[in-house]
Image (cartoon, rainbow, N blue to C red):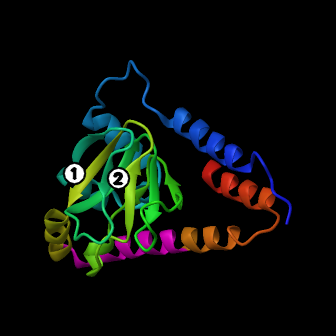
């Protein structure tokens, strides 16, 4: 099989370009909770959920800055809550791989991660900030309290699991594509939305 010099550089350049586009502007300072809410109710999983559910979750959330390179979701741990990405970009690596495993997925604002403990599992992946960013932390104790009072809201978390399952299946298929140029193109198209 012929080697393809530059292919890893192409992938790294694409990741760097995406991270640069999603980085917080230097002049932005701290994001306020209204701006964070605006992002999370217009993009991603919460965008098409009922307002009462969205508001209840966002009301218990706490904004947290994450520095580029910071690991904030550790595979195998019980976790303390789930995370909504408000600004920046987060890389995800499977907890089933070694610490040196390549990035599995990139998550952008509006994405949610770290929900496995709600279903009795440990966290399944490592999440690391690709650039300086902001996440909204939803403590599991608060989520469980809301779900106990509103059992029908479990459906919304089931929807999140199903959406992610479809993404993971698609990525798995894309990784089997040949030649490598097609594989890289497919992955970049998924990241572009």
Residue at 17% across, 71% down: 144
| Residues at discs 1 and 2 in contact (Cβ within 8 Å) | yes
The numbered disc on residue 10 is: none
Q: Which of marks 1 and 2 is nearer the N terminus?
A: 1
Can you give x and y, in whole percent of width and height, for residue 158 in the image? 39, 76
User: Which residue: 46% across, 70% down?
Assistant: 97
Quick one: label 2, few (<14), some, or many (20+) residues within 10 Å?
A: many
Mark 1 sits on what residue?
Answer: 61
Per the rendered image, the range of residues in magenta is: 150-165
Q: Is residue 161 magenta?
A: yes
From this viewpoint, is residue 153 visible?
no
> What is the secondary structure assignment of the residue under circle 2?
strand
Reading the image, the residue beneath label 2 is 84
Occupied quadrant, residue 141: bottom left
The percent position of residue 148, horizontal first and vertical second, equals: 16, 76
Residue at x-position 25% and y-position 42%? 64
Quick check: 48 left or right of 54? right
Instruction: From the top left corner, tell me how far across and down residue 147 is, in percent.
Output: 20, 73
Label 1 sits on a secondary structure element that is loop
Q: Which residue is drawn at 62% across and 44% down?
A: 12
Please state the total of marks drawn on the protein image: 2
Q: Distance between the residues labelled 1 and 2?
A: 9 Å
Residue 174 image offset from top left, x and y in percent: 69, 68
Report if residue 26 lies within the magenta region. no
Q: Quadrant of the N terminus?
A: bottom right
Give the main secondary structure of the magenta stretch: helix
- Between residue 148 and residue 129, name the one nearer to us: 129
Res 47 visible: yes
Quadrant of res 10: top right
């Amino acid at each position: 099989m012929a080697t393809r010099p530059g292919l890893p550089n192409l992938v790294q350049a694409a990741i760097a370009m995406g991270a640069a586009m999603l980085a917080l502007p230097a002049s932005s300072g701290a994001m306020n909770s209204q701006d964070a809410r605006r992002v999370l109710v217009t993009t991603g999983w919460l965008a098409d959920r009922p307002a009462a559910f969205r508001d209840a979750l966002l009301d218990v959330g706490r904004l947290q800055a994450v520095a580029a390179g910071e690991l904030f979701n550790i595979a195998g741990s019980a976790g303390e809550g789930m995370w909504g990405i408000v600004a920046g970009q987060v890389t995800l690596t499977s907890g089933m791989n070694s610490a040196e495993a390549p990035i599995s997925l990139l998550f952008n604002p509006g994405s949610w991660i770290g929900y496995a403990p709600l279903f009795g599992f440990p966290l399944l992946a490592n999440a690391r900030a690709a650039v300086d960013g902001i996440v909204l932390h939803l403590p599991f104790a608060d989520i469980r309290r809301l779900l106990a009072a509103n059992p029908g809201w479990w459906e919304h978390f089931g929807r999140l699991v199903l959406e992610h399952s479809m993404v993971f299946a698609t990525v798995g298929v894309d990784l089997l594509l040949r030649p490598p140029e097609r594989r890289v193109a497919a992955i970049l198209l998924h990241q572009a939305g």
